[in-house]
């Protein structure tokens, strides 16, 4: 089978040592070892994609923040500092708007791979996978590791608009063809 793996979380460095990165690499490697063709769309490859592609037996499609979105992130962080708030690395608006860039990279990957299904690691504000699944009529398998809107609101730096974050999260969960928790 052909599998398009999406990770629209800029906090996960695919080559990194975090639990999320290790989980993604292990899962993709297992799929490849079983004979599946895998392509990964990720927003934070940190160089060395060719080595990583060789190790994982998968093609990597980077979906880095666009220059305009990086500029927006800097402005929002500066504004938060100016009013005495803890600045977040990737504010909600930046992450939500990144779907535009991520969707284009995911569409390119889907056009090249022609996947049998999309496997997405759920990330807060990440609607590009759902949009791609609908546009290309490809089943979406969504891996949910935590209710991220709740987690961000209660245990991290907060959410700009909690009702909207919860609504988007629940919409993605309901629209996925298969939910894995």
Image: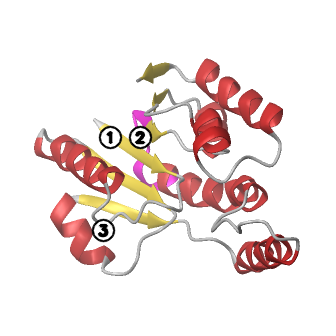
Residue 162 in the image: above or below residue 38: above
Q: For this view, does 36 lie left or right of residue 12?
A: left
Q: For this view, does 85 lie left or right of residue 60?
A: right
In this rendering, the label closer to the viewer, 2 or 3: 3
Q: Secondary structure at mark 2?
A: loop
Q: Label 1 near label 2: C-beta < 8 Å? A: yes
**Disc number at residue 2?**
1
Q: Residue at coordinates 43% horizontally, 60% vertically from top-left? A: 12
| Figure quadrant of the C terminus | top left
Q: Residue at coordinates 68% horizontally, 54% vertically from top-left? A: 99
User: What is the C-alpha distance between the residues marked 1 and 3?
Assistant: 22 Å
Categorize mark 3 by other alpha carbons within 10 Å: few (<14), some (14-19), many (20+). some
**Disc number at residue 115?**
2
User: What is the C-alpha distance between the residues marked 2 and 3?
Assistant: 24 Å
**Who is closer to the viewer here, 178 or 74?**
74
Q: Which residues are magenta?
A: 111-118
Which residue is identified by label 3?
15
Q: Which of the marked residues, 1 or 3, is nearer the chain's N terminus?
A: 1
């Amino acid at each position: 089978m052909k599998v398009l793996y999406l990770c629209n979380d800029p906090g996960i460095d695919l080559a990194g040592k975090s639990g999320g990165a290790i989980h993604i690499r292990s899962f993709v490697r297992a799929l490849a070892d079983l004979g599946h063709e895998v392509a990964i769309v990720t927003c934070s490859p940190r160089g060395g994609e060719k080595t990583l592609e060789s190790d994982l037996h998968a093609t990597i499609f980077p979906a880095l923040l666009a220059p305009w979105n990086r500029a927006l992130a800097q402005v929002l962080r500066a504004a938060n500092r100016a009013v005495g708030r803890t600045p977040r690395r990737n504010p909600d608006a930046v992450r939500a708007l990144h779907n535009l860039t991520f969707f284009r990279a995911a569409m390119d990957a889907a056009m090249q791979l022609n996947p049998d299904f999309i496997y997405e690691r759920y990330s807060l504000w990440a609607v590009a996978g759902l949009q791609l699944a609908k546009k290309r009529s490809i089943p979406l398998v969504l891996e949910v590791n935590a209710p991220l809107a709740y987690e961000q609101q209660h245990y991290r730096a907060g959410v700009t608009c909690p009702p909207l974050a919860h609504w988007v999260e629940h919409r993605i969960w309901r629209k996925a063809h298969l939910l894995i928790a």
